[in-house]
């Protein structure tokens, strides 16, 4: 959670049990799917408080809380130490939620991917590496499709016919938010993770923080 204290307040009239359940789900979909450098802090936490003054639908409250937490997670990732890009990894068509979460999280925690994106390098081999290294139980290389900001770069496990490294470098250079969408073509589950690229500034900040 990137050394983060998250305090959320609401006026929704929900029971303590429902409030805790909603927060757990929202955190699992947002802060627990966010990483700057894979490290966590002993003080990482998220809490929610309500005065219970306004009637609320349990479903609508969950949707609203999850939306807010995801937006906050994106903001934390975008503001990562030395970051120049926000990375949003979407894993789709997975055989299970666990597989989708593992693949999405593997993309935003890979130092090879983070440094490649900082250098505007559309290295699809590193993306395939992270997918294979994710620990997902169900995956076949020849079924994987990958897009970067809606541009198809990998089709059926190989470079797409339309893959153009020069055009993709320009695309990466021109965008501060990079969306990497991966279709495993194994099922109907999906997940999203949030991270940042890694620059020389990250190393400098964390090497000189006691100076």
Image: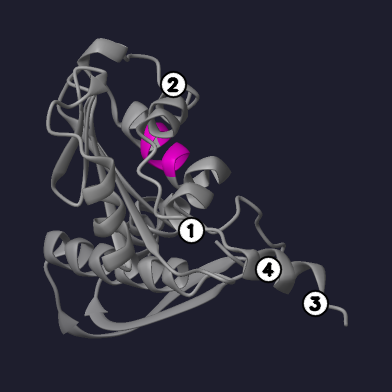
Decide if residue 32 is on the left or right side of residue 17.
right
Secondary structure, magenta segment, majority class:
helix
Q: Quadrant of residue 13?
A: bottom left
Q: Disc 2 versus disc 4: distance between alpha carbons?
A: 32 Å
Question: Which residue is under mark 2?
Answer: 132
Closer mark to the observer between disc 2 and disc 4: 2
- Residue ID at (57%, 45%): 111
Q: Quadrant of residue 97?
A: top left
Q: Are marks 4 and 1 in contact (CB under 8 Å)?
A: no
Q: Disc 2 versus disc 3: distance between alpha carbons?
A: 35 Å
Question: Which residue is under mark 1?
Answer: 197
- Residue ID at (42%, 70%): 78
> Does 31 sit above or below residue 94?
below
Q: Which mark is residue 43?
A: 4
Q: Disc 1 versus disc 2: distance between alpha carbons?
A: 20 Å
Q: Earlier in the sequence, mark 1 or mark 3?
A: 1
Question: Which residue is under mark 3?
Answer: 209
């Amino acid at each position: 959670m990137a050394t983060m204290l998250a305090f959320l307040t609401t006026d929704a009239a929900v029971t303590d049990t429902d409030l805790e359940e909603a927060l757990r789900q929202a955190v699992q979909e947002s802060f627990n799917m966010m990483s700057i450098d894979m490290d966590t802090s002993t003080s990482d936490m998220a809490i929610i408080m309500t005065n219970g003054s306004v009637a609320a639908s349990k479903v609508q409250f969950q949707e609203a809380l999850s939306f807010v937490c995801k937006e906050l997670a994106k903001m934390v990732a975008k503001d990562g130490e030395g970051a120049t890009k926000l990375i949003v990894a979407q894993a789709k068509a997975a055989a299970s939620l666990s597989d989708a979460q593992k693949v999405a999280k593997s993309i935003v925690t890979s130092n090879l991917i983070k440094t490649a994106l900082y250098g505007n390098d559309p290295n699809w081999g590193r993306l395939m590496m992270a997918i294979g290294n994710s620990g997902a139980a169900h995956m076949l290389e020849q079924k994987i499709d990958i897009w970067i900001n809606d541009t198809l770069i990998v089709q059926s496990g190989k470079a797409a016919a339309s893959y153009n490294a020069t055009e993709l470098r320009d695309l990466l250079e021109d965008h501060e938010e990079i969306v990497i969408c991966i279709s495993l073509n194994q099922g109907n589950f999906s997940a999203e993770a949030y991270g940042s690229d890694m620059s020389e500034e990250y190393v400098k900040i964390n090497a000189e923080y006691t100076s």
